[in-house]
Amino acid sequence: MKKITSAYRSAAERAIHLKASTGSHCPANGFWRTADLLSDPIFVFEGSMMPPGKGGSTTWFLDEAHAGPPAYPLPGR
């Protein structure tokens, strides 16, 4: 699995429109959608492999980035 570069992202980084192709590593946590809108947005974790869409290989676009501190405290912290 690809190493996560940072647990926190600035607002400027979140504003960048990210895209990734099926089979590539996901560049950021968040909800991803296909350009053709055939698939519902799905949540993909950073470093995971981007899945195929309903029509096979596709390009995914970041719909809503989720960044910042965890909503709940992590164990042991």
Image (cartoon, rainbow, N blue to C red):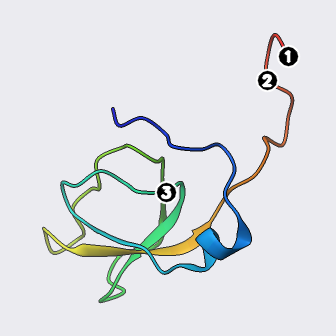
- State which tag comes first along the sequence, 3 or 1: 3
Whole-Å distance between the Cαs marked 2 and 1? Answer: 6 Å
In depth, the one of 43 and 65 nearer the eye is: 65
In depth, the one of 36 and 4 nearer the eye is: 4
Q: Quadrant of residue 20?
A: bottom left
- The mark tally for this picture is 3
Q: Residue at x 48, y 71 (%)?
A: 41
Q: Amino acid at mark 1?
A: Arg
Instruction: Report if the CB atoms under discs 2 and 1 are less than 8 Å apart.
Output: yes
Q: Is residue 62 left or right of residue 36?
A: right
Mark 1: few/some/many CA within 10 Å (<14, 14-19, 20+): few
Q: Residue at x 65, y 43 (%)?
A: 7
- State which tag comes first along the sequence, 3 or 2: 3
Q: Which residue is mark 3?
A: 28
Q: Amino acid at mark 3?
A: Ala
- The location of residue 14, given as percent across then percent down, is 62, 71
Instruction: Name the residue at the left extreme.
Output: 56
In depth, the one of 15 and 73 nearer the eye is: 15
| In the image, residue 16 above or below residue 77 | below
- The location of residue 38, given as percent across then percent down, is 32, 83
Q: Which mark is residue 77?
A: 1
Q: Is residue 63 left or right of residue 74?
A: left
Q: Residue at x 28, y 47 (%)?
A: 49
Q: Which residue is mark 2?
A: 74
Q: Which mark is residue 63?
A: none
- The location of residue 3, given as percent across then percent down, is 42, 35
